[in-house]
Image: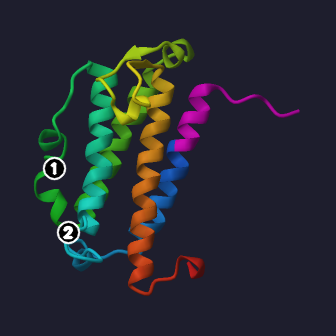
Amino acid sequence: MIDDPTLHELLTARLSLVREDLDDVLGRLSDEMLAWAPSEGMRTVGGQLEEIAATEVQIVGWMRDKRHVPYEEASDFGDALKTLEGLRSVLASTRAKTLAYLDSLSETDLSMPIPFPPKWFESLRLPAVPPSEAFRSLAAHEWYHVGQLVSYLWFRGDNPYKW
């Protein structure tokens, strides 16, 4: 008989799975690729990674502190944005804080709606949702950008079906 996973276990597994996909992409990148984008006006490789971390800072900041963290503040990672090693560190540190916050919540906490800023994507554009939905949106946001990065690599001739 298989035990039913708790909501906490499901969310942790979802965040872990998407991070595994991102780690696969990170293993195919180099410092020289961080400033590259497929076309002018598109977000760079480094910009995609910054977006993943900064949005996670914003989502968790809202849930934990009920404070909107402006993107400029959420993305202020200093010189870490200049290297792949620095970005890996930012992503790992950000995720560790996210998981620590998730670990601090009970199953009831994860299920009780909390208010969110009006029409915010992470709250499904609803005025209040359970934190569990915001954690799912966080994972979906990361997967979206991981998909973009996979497409960037594929554009450069790195076929993900051969990874």
What crowding class fits label 1: few (fewer than 14 Cα within 10 Å), some (14-19), or many (20 or more)? some
Q: Looking at the picture, which amino acid does disc 1 mark?
A: Phe
- The residues colored magenta run 1-14
Element assignment for label 1: loop
Q: Looking at the picture, which amino acid does disc 2 mark?
A: Gly
Tell me: 73 left or right of 50: left
Q: Is residue 112 magenta?
A: no
Mark 1–mark 2 distance (CA, rounded to whole Å): 22 Å
Q: Nearer the viewer, residue 23 or 121?
A: 121
Tell me if residue 144 comes above or below residue 163 in the rendering: above
Q: Residue at x 18, y 41 (%)?
A: 71
Residue mark closest to the camera, 1 vs 2: 2
Which residue is farthest bottom?
Answer: 157
**What label sits on residue 41 in the rendered view?**
2
Tell me: 69 left or right of 11: left
Q: Earlier in the sequence, mark 1 or mark 2?
A: 2
**What label sits on residue 77 in the rendered view?**
1
Q: Residue at x 55, y 50 (%)?
A: 17
Across and down, in percent, residue 89 comes to: 28, 54
**What label sits on residue 89 in the rendered view?**
none
Give the quarter of the image for residue 2.
Answer: top right
Tell me if residue 157 comes above or below residue 107 in the rendering: below
Q: Residue at x 57, y 28 (%)?
A: 8
Across and down, in percent, residue 44 comes to: 24, 68
Tell me if residue 82 comes above or below residue 2 in the rendering: below
Across and down, in percent, residue 33 comes to: 26, 77
Element assignment for label 2: loop
